[in-house]
Image (cartoon, rainbow, N blue to C red):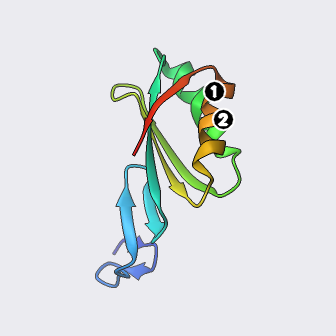
Amino acid sequence: MGSYPNGPLGNLRSDWAYTPGGYTDGMRTTTYDVQGMTCGHCVRSVTEEITEVEGVTSVDVDLDKGTAVVAGDADPETVKAAVVEAGYEVTGVH
């Protein structure tokens, strides 16, 4: 039988939330609209920069949607700065 973040199937805590980047322990998820990504290297660059931000627990960058879904308690302005550092523009946060 498979297991999940808090134990065996059927014993999930209600404060765990599934995001495209995985399960989060009741943490905030924020979606950043990222403009300018055109390839896998772009996705890797954005992912690596955001991962370095204090408070980020997971990142899921989607090239087709042009988004980065970030879980954790990182400061949104710091995450935006990381995207800019990678060479891209944040056009929206939600």
Residue name at image x 38 percent, y 81 percent: 8
Measured as percent of width and height from the top left, residue 7 is found at: 43, 81
The residue pinned by badge 2 equals: 82
Residue at 39% x, 77% y: name it. Answer: 15
Question: Depth check: 13 or 68 in front?
Answer: 68
Quadrant in which the N terminus appears: bottom left
Picture coordinates of residue 49, whole percent (x, y): 67, 35
Q: Mark 1: which amino acid?
A: Val
Q: Say whether marks 2 and 1 touch (CB < 8 Å).
A: yes
Q: Mark 1 points at which residue?
A: 84
Can residue 19 be seen at all in this image of the molecule? Answer: yes
Q: In this view, does 90 lie to the left or right of 64?
A: right
Check the image and name the residue furthest to the left: 10
- Going by the numbered disc 2, the residue's amino acid type is Ala
Residue at the spot x=66%, y=35% of the render?
Answer: 82
Q: In which quarter of the image is residue 55?
A: bottom right
Give 92 or 66, whichever is nearer the viewer: 92
Q: Residue, x 46% and y 73% (percent of image)?
A: 5
Q: Pick out the residue farthest to the bottom.
A: 11
The secondary structure type at the circle numbered 2 is helix
- On residue 24, the disc is none
Dot 1 falls on a residue whose secondary structure is helix
Instruction: Count residues near mark 1 (Cα–Cα under 10 Å), then give few for <14, some for 14-19, many for 20+.
Output: some
Q: Residues under labels 2 and 1: Cα distance?
A: 5 Å
